[in-house]
Image (cartoon, coloured by chain):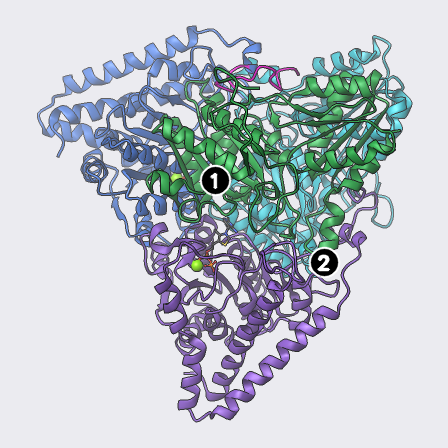
Chain colours: A cyan, B green, C blue, D purple
Amino acid sequence: MSETPGEPVATERELTMSRAMVEAISSEMAADEEVFVMGEDVADYGGIFDSTQGLLEEFGRDRVMDVPISETGFIGAGVGAAQAGMRPIVELMFADFFGVAMDQIYNNMAKNTYMSGRSVSVPMVLTTAVGGTYNDAAQHSQTLYGTFAHLPGMKVVVPSNAYDAKGLMHNAIRDDDPVVFMFHKRLMGLGWMPAPEGPKTPVPEDDYTIPFGEADVKREGTDATVVTLGLHVHRAMEAADELVDEGIDTEVIDLRTLVPLDAETVLESVRKTGRLVVVDEDYRSYGVTGEIVARAAEDALADLEAVERVAMPDVPIPYARPLEEEVNPGVEDIAAAVRATR
Amino acid sequence: MSETPGEPVATERELTMSRAMVEAISSEMAADEEVFVMGEDVADYGGIFDSTQGLLEEFGRDRVMDVPISETGFIGAGVGAAQAGMRPIVELMFADFFGVAMDQIYNNMAKNTYMSGRSVSVPMVLTTAVGGTYNDAAQHSQTLYGTFAHLPGMKVVVPSNAYDAKGLMHNAIRDDDPVVFMFHKRLMGLGWMPAPEGPKTPVPEDDYTIPFGEADVKREGTDATVVTLGLHVHRAMEAADELVDEGIDTEVIDLRTLVPLDAETVLESVRKTGRLVVVDEDYRSYGVTGEIVARAAEDALADLEAVERVAMPDVPIPYARPLEEEVNPGVEDIAAAVRATR
Amino acid sequence: MPSVTELREIYEEMVTARRYEKRLQEEYLEGKQPAFDISAGPIPGELHLAAGHEASAAGVCQHLRDADTVTAPHRPHHIAISKGVDLNRMTAEIFGRRTGLSKGKGGHMHLFDPDVNFACSGIIAQGCPPAVGAAMAAKKRNTDEVAVAFLGEGAIDQGGFFESLNLASVRNLPVVFVVEDNDWAISMPKERVTDVSNGAQRAEGHDMHGVRVDRDDAVAVYEAAAEAVGRARDGNGPTILEVQVHRRMGHFMGDAEGYRPDEDVEAAEMRDSVERLAADLRKHGVDDDELTAIRDRASARVEEAIEFAKEQPEPDPEEAYEDVFTNPPAGATGGED
Amino acid sequence: MPSVTELREIYEEMVTARRYEKRLQEEYLEGKQPAFDISAGPIPGELHLAAGHEASAAGVCQHLRDADTVTAPHRPHHIAISKGVDLNRMTAEIFGRRTGLSKGKGGHMHLFDPDVNFACSGIIAQGCPPAVGAAMAAKKRNTDEVAVAFLGEGAIDQGGFFESLNLASVRNLPVVFVVEDNDWAISMPKERVTDVSNGAQRAEGHDMHGVRVDRDDAVAVYEAAAEAVGRARDGNGPTILEVQVHRRMGHFMGDAEGYRPDEDVEAAEMRDSVERLAADLRKHGVDDDELTAIRDRASARVEEAIEFAKEQPEPDPEEAYEDVFTNPPAGATGGED
Ligand SMILES: Cc1ncc(C[n+]2csc(CCOP(=O)(O)OP(=O)(O)O)c2C)c(N)n1
Ligand SMILES: Cc1ncc(C[n+]2csc(CCOP(=O)(O)OP(=O)(O)O)c2C)c(N)n1
Ligand SMILES: [Mg+2]
Ligand SMILES: [Mg+2]
């Protein structure tokens, strides 16, 4: 799993996902003066979702910069600084706000490498909070995984636990390309938004990287393949546990990165189980679930016996608890979909 | 096809797609004072791609408004005017520019109906030019079909010919919901960008509507189903003609609208042919081709014998002719994909 | 200068808003004890309270009619109350109930009341363009309606605000941009994010009018707004009206404000526009009994709204699939899950 | 006041740019006769020429070094030339050749030359934020490098411009925003889209410096730019520098300019900054022979670049799949078609 020389030392130390993410940032900032952090409320507040907690104290205001509520301005400034050779980590507070800055994100950040014939690089990390489950409604609950993954030129990373978050963040900062690092609020381990079991994991103190494009088989199984990411990795694992009692042995795959996509691991699994369930917190149509199903249909059609998609339906995300619970795929929805493949 | 009382009178009069589109707008403006047009260069210029040609002369500057290069400002103003009961037609000159105004488009225009529990409506048409083939490179050649279709709350229309453009535009303006009307530059019949054979069709002088969510079977066939939209309808027809000589009888489906999606017509065809080829000018991954394949895999898996996707690969759109030709799916690419399903 | 009757109305709106938010806060925190858990308790989601902002909304909206449009940001309650939004249904919405303004779909940042042309959005400055559009509609229809966009001082660095200024100015539209300057954008003090201490100065880049009310004072706001709204109504174009207000609480409930100096919090508490207006009213001969009566009436109305909300049913889960479209397509996508 | 040597350099850049674009125009239109077909002829895509804008770029860039950053908009050639972009490789790029600056992938709106820190973008005003970022990098690294963002007068209504002003101002960054005011944004005259006739006035909303050069005159630009660039280099913050220029042609090749009064075209042709500078040079004792020699040198350089470009090979189709990433992932998505 690790690309750094030597395996990370085994550890019992458990970290929340936010601590793990910050540890990677802090280590890279200490190692390289050119790495800096910029965003709204990243300094004194430490990030609304603790994504930069403690960095101001460690590195000071010059390297941990609060900026005006001007996402086009400061994300574009990140692009400019990255092209000048620095390695900015820029935070878009919620992925839902992408619409005020999307031109910088996808017309400059994502395309400049290609449009320049690779004479310039944009070694920038765009961190952003995603996801629902706490009733923040239509403008603050989306994951938008499909929206970012669809547009070429950005690597798109979605960690589901602390161990991965640290390794993927190290890789993101060291990568010479723009990386969109989408962290799920519910996984961060915030005091005011308890995380489920799972994302808090043992995390080695040393640096280590997790390469992009390597999905993680979280649970091996022979009867059905559940492909998912982010928060829903944990829900899928819970569903898989539940299904054991019914004699259904589920394989659960955590994609970890959407771009690059590890289609091979998905295909291998589908060839084995013949049954594919894709679970996504993003909208159902024209997104992640469609892509994964299409990959399987293209390359493993003969083995495919059943296909199910479990995703946010094509509605804006509602506010009231029973409504949000209805649309956000739950453990029971996943279990039912697996059953439906039989 | 028509929802207006009585069938449109048969006609020999042929119009370009741009003339047909403008005819619908003009007729609706004459009928309803609340319809107006706003955008960059929509007045004296008549739209860079002739999408508003002649409207200034007919309706004057109050109803055909040039506006500053402030897409967030004027698209958002369209939302406000629509919520106040007017029926604005707002032009985003190129779909590629969505990133400077996406928040108004998908956080207000698309979501306000739902977020208000339908106490407000947003009867607005967002027109926008899409597509490549003339070497306008990475920031002016995209279709972004998948990007718009993925986000719920907007109806997404992609006409492939003059007859459809008029009927769909009438429907778009009369619809009480936000409609994104994506017209392909290469189909408009511009003097300086010759259209292929096909989009110029007979167009009745009377008003008529084409309902959303009804795909058009352009060509019946028994051996393979090609599902596509926009410019590539014409390329698929050409490929189908070519394949006849090889004894392959291809069905070609023009989706016409992505939201709502007429999955039923696609499924019926796939159940018949067993072979599905999806052709799209948008990027391959996490977009239209994945969705259509997934629909077929979900609901017609048993009938599905082969699946192919022909789309823009996941690269920004290159400038030089041989490069753009390589990435933009051509007639030969489509024919080859159909052959590959056998 | 507002009449005494108007002063009483303004006062009543302000104490209604203050009382309302105090009660919301109590309800919100209930069930979030001892550890604050955003997903627990009777009120879902985030909650941004506006205690200390009331003078701005009350002073401005005194000049507005139901037909005039108001757009508000993420901190909308005081503005909604002054604009005359139905308090019962608004509260039901905030509690996530089926009879809420948006049937429980919108929530506290997405309140819509078309009867009084009120709407809000949770995205910074993005209420400005729709307000410009409402003003555009008014002008096209030749009415004398106006539109007012409220936003925070942190929002005046956002592109959508500037584009709105320019569009309003070049088209001479009847719109007023009311900037509530509470010195903070979450944890970021104003001077960290802009060099301009008076936000109304942004007007100078657009040849439009800009004025700042430097005290947290409803009467001063009323007077400045009289001019700004009057200018718009008379067809004389847009104005930026910046108003000094004070954030008496955290940015949202649960914000411990570790970044904020104690003196700043104390200062905000000292400069209480509600108290100031009460003193003004006393000067105009309104006695304490009458003030108490107003406050009691406000409290009663607030209690009624909260009672109403709590009695309302929650929406059924399947309702989540409704209301995406006003004209739902026959074979609509989505719905299944 | 520029020295005579500097004046000569400025003149040479201006005539190079003028000549260059004349030749590009000829090449572009070749193969598009008799009917204009955008997809025909040796130069692909759109072409936005800058004849009449030269004084701005030449006057400003005279103060810049290779290490300074310049971002340009959709009309970039004169700026690229003044910044010292490699003319041969730039031309090869415009012709869509494999040895072009971007290997034929970028085209005329997406020219990148990292050797002289030049980049452009086809999206209005969106070169401003990256220029601010380059200035931020310079400041963090404690160099005295500056960044200059060029844009049109139509672009100063775009949100990204304002956000850049504010960010540059509050962080006191070494950046100059050069607004080339040619009175037109495609078919829209300036007064139709903003009330502000002097774009430098936008600075007032941000407490930053703003200055307008009201004549299309390289010497005046040089002097104003000396101050603006000097201010940036000395750590004294950003400036808007607006420069009156003239659009001598259509917005892009193929634009028949039906919307534009004949007098406006004539006026643009009369006010020729190249001629004006030649007259200045003559006043400084530079004789016609020398001017002719400069022009000949420029022409020769232009011919060489065009010859070079035409000799270059086109890219192979498969090269389309390369260069998406600097660190391409092992099992990359994309590629297949
Ligand atoms: C475009 C966008 N960026 C960031 C946010 C997150 N956010 C919500 S409120 C807020 C601070 C707003 O400050 P201000 O405008 O001064 O209003 P206040 O909260 O002080 O009333 C921020 C940054 C957002 N909602 N939208
Ligand atoms: C965000 C965005 N909106 C619209 C356009 C289309 N467009 C290209 S150039 C142009 C006019 C620009 O005018 P100005 O800034 O004055 O520059 P000029 O062309 O006059 O040099 C427009 C509207 C664009 N490229 N980007
Ligand atoms: Mg504030
Ligand atoms: Mg211009």
- Say whether residue A160 is magenta: no
Task: Tell me the magenta residue range.
Answer: C322-337
Q: Secondary structure at mark 1?
A: strand
Q: Is residue A43 left or right of residue C141?
A: right
Residue D51 in the image, given as x and y percentages of width and height: 49, 69
Q: Observer-nearest residue: D229 or B336?
A: B336
Residue B241 in the image, given as x and y percentages of width and height: 78, 34
Q: From the image, which quarter does the C terminus of chain A lie in?
A: top right
Give the residue number, with chain letter if any, for mark 2. Answer: A118
Give the residue number, with chain letter if any, for mark 1. Answer: B91
Residue depicted at x 37% and y 30%: B30
Q: Is residue D335 left or right of residue C114?
A: right
Residue C155 in sight in this render: yes
Q: Secondary structure at mark 2?
A: loop
Front of the two marks 2 and 1: 1
The three-letter amino acid code for the residue at tag 1 is: Glu
Extreme residue toward the left, this view:
C285
What is the number of the mark on residue A75?
none
Residue D211 in the image, given as x and y percentages of width and height: 36, 66
Q: Is residue C261 left or right of residue B187?
A: left
Question: Quadrant of the rendered structure where residue C143 is?
Answer: top left
Residue A308 in sight in this render: no
Question: Quadrant of the rendered structure where residue B156 is?
Answer: top right
Numbered disc 1: what chain? B
Secondary structure mostly seen in the magenta stretch: loop
Q: From the image, which quarter does the N terminus of chain A lie in?
A: top right
Extreme residue toward the front, this view:
B12
Q: Quadrant of ligand 4?
A: bottom left
Q: Observer-nearest residue: D228 or B310?
A: B310
Residue C44 in the image, given as x and y percentages of width and height: 50, 19
Would you call the spot at circle 1 few (<14 residues within 10 Å), some (14-19), or many (20 or more)?
many
